[in-house]
Amino acid sequence: MASRNFYLQLIVRVIFLTLTAIAIAFSITAKWYIALGFSVLLLTAQVYSLISFINSTNRKIAYFFDAIRNEDFTLRFPEKVTIESFKELNQSLNRVNGLIQEVHLQLQIRENYYQEILKQANIGIMTFNEKGHILFSNPTLERLLNYSPLNHIKQLKQIDEGLYEIFMPFEPFERKLFQLTNEREQKQLALKSTPLTLDKQSLLLVVAQDIHHELDEKETDSWVRLIRVLTHEIMNTITPITSISDSILKHFKSLERESSEGIGNDKMASSIKGLQVIREQGGDLMEFVQSYRSFLSVPKPDKALVPAKKLFDKTQLLTSKEPIQNIEIKWTAEPKDLELFIDEKQLTQVLINLVKNAIHSLEGREKGSIWVRAALDRNGKKYIEVRDNGPGIPEELIDEIFVPFFTTKDKGTGIGLSLSKQIMQQHGGSLKLHSIIDQETVFTLLF
């Protein structure tokens, strides 16, 4: 029925055009110039009307897409028209327009929701393009930097010149630390960047977090533990020194009273033994202090690409003199050509310490095994793990194991693991521990 109405109007218009053309031909033949002029005007009007009638559908669709492009959802097409096909077309366009409007509203609601989340986040967030224009910065970042509004990263110069110098060469997936100091406080900012692409435009998303408070807590806790251990160790060393010194002093006083009778050889020998003990205890104290100094003066790593196999071969050679009866040590790298960006000397020392600890933990076990493995995790990040099937580490000691000078051995300063952890931190990584009693102990070096 709809198509009939459309075609009927089209046929009627064509018939009128044909009749008008015949009238023009007859007027020319009869030389009726007035009728000819009127017929020409009528023909022109009919042709224009026919073209408009045919293009009305195209115009409606064009108007529709223009309105959508301009986010104008107020456009409505009349649905009460005589031509049924146009009525159905208008209804369809209005229905699609309504659906698009609903989707647009939902997107706006979702965008406002995400914007609110970003505003309320407790970490600073901002995005800027390759020209340095800041497209977004949340209130948390403006509070951290004490600056608002942020429109361009050049404004960071006004906050701190060093902060601007960090942002200028900021590379994707880079992490940086910056200490921001003002008249009131110090802020230790942890910065991390992530690349984004929006509307074919390359952007850099930077998140900033003030970790000064957390660092203060960790540092205070570490120093409390350090002082506790230092006090314990130093007092254990000084106490016998003072006791023996007091005994020697009393002994020499008694010798002074007996000087008229002469000094006996036995007493002189006893004095010499006491002095030897003092010397030995003093030497132990100096060794302990030297360990303390080495912990505080770890040099900055001189990093280079080192094949994991080369690192393992060197460590294996340096640990081969350790007693390894009934202990199997396996060294693997997956893939075999895996390379690590490290300070070879420092990482060798870390691995030597971990392997020696594993060997010592396996003393007395019938079938001990150690597995040193370098590989990639699911995210493509490199790691090394040292795994042994020793007695494990009790849960209550896991938090203490990295504390400087804490040790469960009869001999040793307890500096090895804390030094290893510090080396890994300077490499931008970490040293993690996982242990199950009587099953396994795993130290993992994450890069």
Image (spheres, rainbow, N blue to C red):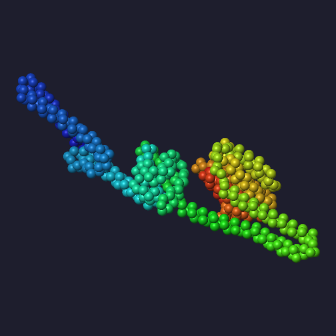
- Whether residue 209 is visible to the viewer of this picture, yes or no, is no
| Residue under the image location 48 percent in, 61 percent down | 183
Instruction: Describe residue 215's horizontal placement relative to residue 373 as left or right.
Output: left
Q: Does 138 appear above or below 168?
A: below
The image shows a total of numbered marks equal to 0
Along the viewing direction, whichever of 315 and 44 lies nearer the viewer: 315
- Spot occupied by residue 333 in the image (x, y as percentages of width and height): 68, 46
Along the viewing direction, whichever of 132 and 223 lies nearer the viewer: 223
| Residue under the image location 51 percent in, 45 percent down | 169
| Residue under the image location 48 percent in, 50 percent down | 161
Along the viewing direction, whichever of 277 and 227 lies nearer the viewer: 277
Q: Does 309 appear above or below 251?
A: above
Along the viewing direction, whichever of 51 and 272 lies nearer the viewer: 272
- Spot occupied by residue 179 in the image (x, y as percentages of width and height): 53, 56
Instruction: Describe residue 132's horizontal placement relative to residue 266 as left or right.
Output: left
Where residue 19 sits, quadrant-wise, is top left
- Spot occupied by residue 44 in the image (x, y as percentages of width and height): 15, 32
Q: Quadrant of the N terminus?
A: top left
Where residue 252 sits, quadrant-wise, is bottom right
Instruction: Describe residue 267's horizontal placement relative to residue 139 as left or right.
Output: right
> Which residue is the extreme one toward the front?
260
| Residue under the image location 71 percent in, 50 percent down | 348
Where residue 254 sits, quadrant-wise, is bottom right
- Spot occupied by residue 205 in the image (x, y as percentages of width and height): 47, 50
Q: Does 314 appear above or below 260?
A: above
Instruction: Describe residue 249's horizontal placement relative to residue 189 as left or right.
Output: right
- Whether residue 90 is visible to the viewer of this picture, yes or no, is yes
